[in-house]
């Protein structure tokens, strides 16, 4: 087994330089285990700026099956996750696109890829907790009062550093 020091791995303040161009076509695909270090870097880069919640390496390895990535010539430049919550409900989590690749439609393609998976899984409703209301509105989500979401989802909030000052907006969308 490779000798990896999980505790010592910290995301850099800046993202690793990419050697691919936003003009190059991206493939949206299911994440592989080898993508975890780049997901960790991308998600925590935005988390450090307060845009989204952080993820540990442990969480990402445990939940790598939830993730879809945008891949440009082998470089991961975006990600999004679908977390099944209940019988007919799933959460869209950790949608992030590398700054150099924003505005190219990758965020939309990643979330649409989650829609396909949700349909395959017979999930009928999606929700997200986000600061990017405009982006998710564009993708058919609508704002709802946070307490309209099932009580079960708030269990996750108990470990969140934002739990007493949460500023995220609850949004829902039907998958049908
Ligand atoms: C939010 C984010 C994922 C969008 O990714 P992106 O690849 O730049 O978005 P796309 O190019 O796919 O945009 C799709 C549509 O949404 C619109 N859009 C994108 N970001 C938007 C925003 N912040 N507000 C309003 N509309 C937005 C685009 O204009 C586009 O609409 P159009 O087709 O009518 O032109 C990206 O900006 C990002 O990674 N932000 C930092 C991390 C973050 O905040 N993630 C959300 C966590 S929940």
Image (cartoon, rainbow, N blue to C red):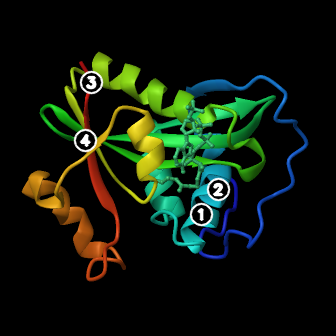
Q: Is residue 119 above or below residue 104?
A: above
- Please state the horizontal and vertical placement of residue 156, each as a whole percent of the image: 25, 63
Q: What residue do we see at 65% from left, 69% from top?
A: 5
- Please state the horizontal and vertical placement of residue 10, each as a whole percent of the image: 67, 72
Kindly identify which numbered label has been placed on residue 175. 3
Q: What residue do we see at 57% from left, 58% from top?
A: 43
Q: What residue do we see at 49% from left, 66% from top?
A: 54
Residue beneath label 1, please?
46
Q: Would you say residue 32 is visible in this rendering?
A: no
Q: Secondary structure at mark 4?
A: strand
- Can you tell me whether the CB of the residue at mark 4 lies under 8 Å from the nearest atom of ligand 1? no
In this rendering, the label closer to the viewer, 1 or 2: 1
Q: Would you say residue 122 is visible in this rendering?
A: yes
C-alpha span from label 4 to label 3: 10 Å
Residue beneath label 2, please?
42
C-alpha span from label 2 to label 4: 25 Å
Residue beneath label 4, please?
172
């Amino acid at each position: 087994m490779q000798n990896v020091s999980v505790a010592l791995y910290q995301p850099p303040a800046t993202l690793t330089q990419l050697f691919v161009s936003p003009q190059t076509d991206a493939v949206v695909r299911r994440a592989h285990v080898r993508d975890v270090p780049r997901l960790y870097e991308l998600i925590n880069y935005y988390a450090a700026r307060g845009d989204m919640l952080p993820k540990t390496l442990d969480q990402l390895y445990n939940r790598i099956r939830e993730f879809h990535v945008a891949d440009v010539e082998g470089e991961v430049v975006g990600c999004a996750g679908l977390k099944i919550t209940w019988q007919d409900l799933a959460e869209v989590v950790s949608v992030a696109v590398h700054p150099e690749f924003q505005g190219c439609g990758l965020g939309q393609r990643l979330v649409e890829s989650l829609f396909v998976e949700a349909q395959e899984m017979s999930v009928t409703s999606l929700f997200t907790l986000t600061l990017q209301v405009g982006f998710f509105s564009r993708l058919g989500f609508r704002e709802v009062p946070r307490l309209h979401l099932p009580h079960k989802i708030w269990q996750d909030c108990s470990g969140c550093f934002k739990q007493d000052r949460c500023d995220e907006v609850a949004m829902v969308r039907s998958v049908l």
